[in-house]
Image: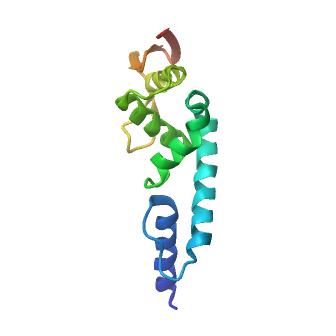
Amino acid sequence: MTGEGLAARQAALVEALTAGRPVPPGIDAFRFEAARVALLRKRAGEVARQWPMLAAGMRGTWYPAFAEWAATRPTQGSLRDGWDLARDLSRRGDLPAIAAGELAAREAAWRYDGSSAPRPRRLPVVRRAGGAVVVQVAGRVRVLRVF
């Protein structure tokens, strides 16, 4: 097998493991699924460390909800994965109240467009998420209200 052929097979395997693509030919399905589940659990743990209120607010549904959401999305890193999930939950009205302040605080302190890396905000801003209202002035974030 050529180096290019091997690289293509490896890329297909990574895509299948992390982005929900079909299992490449010649890969044992049972072992593949075990590896995929292990990677999702590791990813969920990393996101929970970056977004503790989001994970805590979902209680016993954290892992299944995260795994369902992440199964077809390649990772963007734990900070961005949690941010994207929190925004999705907020849009659907399913963001736990305890996580609303966490999301609003991140939205106030950082600019994140969903595709590029977050950058610190320089100008004052007020953000809402769920029932939380947060203000950022001079780099300091204050929670004004959480419903």
- Residue found at x 62% / y 50%: 41
- Residue found at x 54% / y 45%: 64
Q: Is residue 97 left or right of residue 34?
A: left
Q: Where is residue 90 in the image (x, y as percent from the top left)?
A: 40, 29
Q: Residue furthest top?
A: 144
Q: Where is residue 56 in the image (x, y as percent from the top left)?
A: 61, 29
Against 88, residue 97 (above or below) is above
Q: Position of residue 38 (x, y in %)?
A: 63, 57
Q: Residue furthest bottom?
A: 1
- Residue found at x 57% / y 53%: 40
Q: In this view, does 22 lie to the left or right of 32?
A: left
Against 20, residue 147 (above or below) is above
Against 76, residue 91 (above or below) is above
For the image shown, how many numbered marks are present on the structure? 0
Q: Which colour scheme is used?
A: rainbow
18, 137: nearer the viewer? 18
Against 108, residue 116 (above or below) is below
Q: Where is residue 22 in the image (x, y as percent from the top left)?
A: 43, 69
- Residue found at x 43% / y 15%: 131
